[in-house]
Amino acid sequence: MIIIRKMALVFFAALLSVGIAGCERETGAEEVGETIDETVEDVGNAVEDACEEVKEGADVADTDC
């Protein structure tokens, strides 16, 4: 029984090490995804800013978009 427990402990330690090592590196797909997310957020902010500027120019009471 002691041998099985030791083997299980070694297995889980190795599994944890591999998992941690895998989380440290970003893959190319993750970087592309983050870039896309940032771009979409920037475009959304630009559209909202433009909408607010148009409403301000039209003297609308509610300038939030």
Image: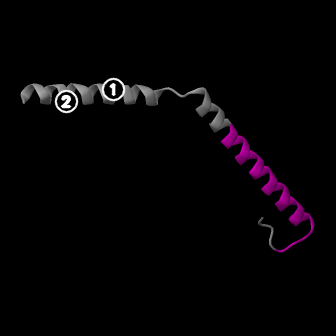
Q: Quadrant of the C terminus?
A: bottom right
**Overall secondary structure of the magenta stretch?**
helix
The label shown at residue 8 is: 2
Q: Nearer the viewer, residue 4 or 45?
A: 4
**Looking at this view, is 60 or 65 the one in front?**
65
Picture quadrant where residue 18 is located: top left
Q: Amino acid at mark 1?
A: Ser
24, 27: nearer the viewer: 27
Q: Quadrant of residue 12?
A: top left
Q: Residue at the spot x=80%, y=72% of the render?
A: 62
Start-end of magenta stretch: 36-61
Rendered position, 1 above or below 40: above
Q: Secondary structure at mark 2?
A: helix
Q: Quadrant of the N terminus?
A: top left
Residue in view at x 87 percent, y 72 percent: 60
Check residue 59 for magenta coloring: yes
* Amino acid type for the residue under numbered disc 2: Ala
x, y percentage for residue 19?
38, 30
| Alpha carbons under labels 2 and 1: distance apart | 14 Å
Q: Position of residue 56 (x, y in %)?
A: 87, 65
Viewer-side label of 2, 1 = 2
Q: Residue at x 92, y 64 (%)?
A: 57
The x, y position of residue 13, in whole percent, is 26, 27
Callout 1 crowding tier (Cα within 10 Å): few <14, some 14–19, many ≥20: few
As drawn, the residue found furthest toward the left would be 1
47 on left or right of 30: right
User: Badge 1 is on which residue?
Assistant: 17
Report the colour scheme: one colour
Residue drawn at (79%, 50%) of the image = 46
Q: Is residue 28 left or right of residue 7?
A: right
